[in-house]
Image: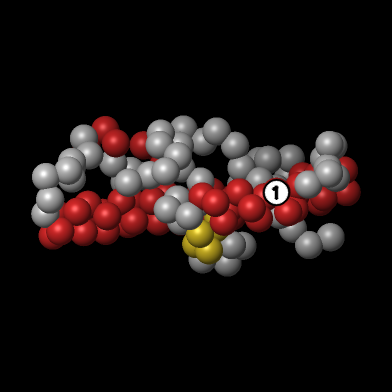
Amino acid sequence: MNPLHPFFLVYVRDNGDVRYSFAHPKQVLEMCRAVCAGKTEPIEQLCALFDRETDQGRRMTKYNGLLDRAVASIGSVLNKRIAAGLTRGGRGFVIPDQEELVERPEDLDLVTWLVITKA
């Protein structure tokens, strides 16, 4: 159900729309590669802009909201895939364990994130 299991990769736009769910990791990775190709160091101006916007990471409400949208998307897509697997039948479908389901941010550990902004 998740090509990158046990990891989830989600692209959430600034307005909270989920552009690519975890079911489309190739598209997210291609976008990241296009943005980051050839870069070996952070872009200091953009880091400074992000630090000002978030007060050095003390005001993360906006980004926590985007993270909540990503988690909600993961739960929704997982539920849709489970429902589809149940309706298709077939002996190969296995219902995931409760521990594998994602319902709230606490169900995941955030490994990393990438903020893409216009300069």
- In the rendered image, residue 51, in percent from the top left (x then y), is placed at 77, 44
Residue 31 lies in quadrant: bottom right
Instruction: Tell me the residue at 40%/56% (across/down).
Output: 73
Residue at horizontal 26%, vertical 33%?
99
Q: Which residue position is annotated with label 1?
A: 33
- Which residue is drawn at the image coordinates 51% and 46% (left, top)? 9
- Seen in the image, is 28 located left or right of residue 93? right
How many numbered callouts? 1
Name of the residue lying farthest toward the right? 45
- Classify 95 as above or below 53: above
- Where disc 1 sits, the SS reads helix
75 vs 81, nearest the viewer: 81
In the rendering, at what x and y percent does residue 63 appear? 58, 51
Q: Amino acid at mark 1?
A: Arg
Q: Nearer the viewer, residue 26 or 6?
A: 26
In the displayed structure, 16 sits above or below 72; it is below
**Residue 77 x/y as whole percent:** 34, 56
Give whichever of 78, 15 is nearer the camera.
78
Left or right of 113? Residue 65 is left
Q: Position of residue 30 (x, y in %)?
A: 64, 53
Is there any visible trace of residue 89 in the rendered image? yes
On the question of residue 70 being in view, the answer is no
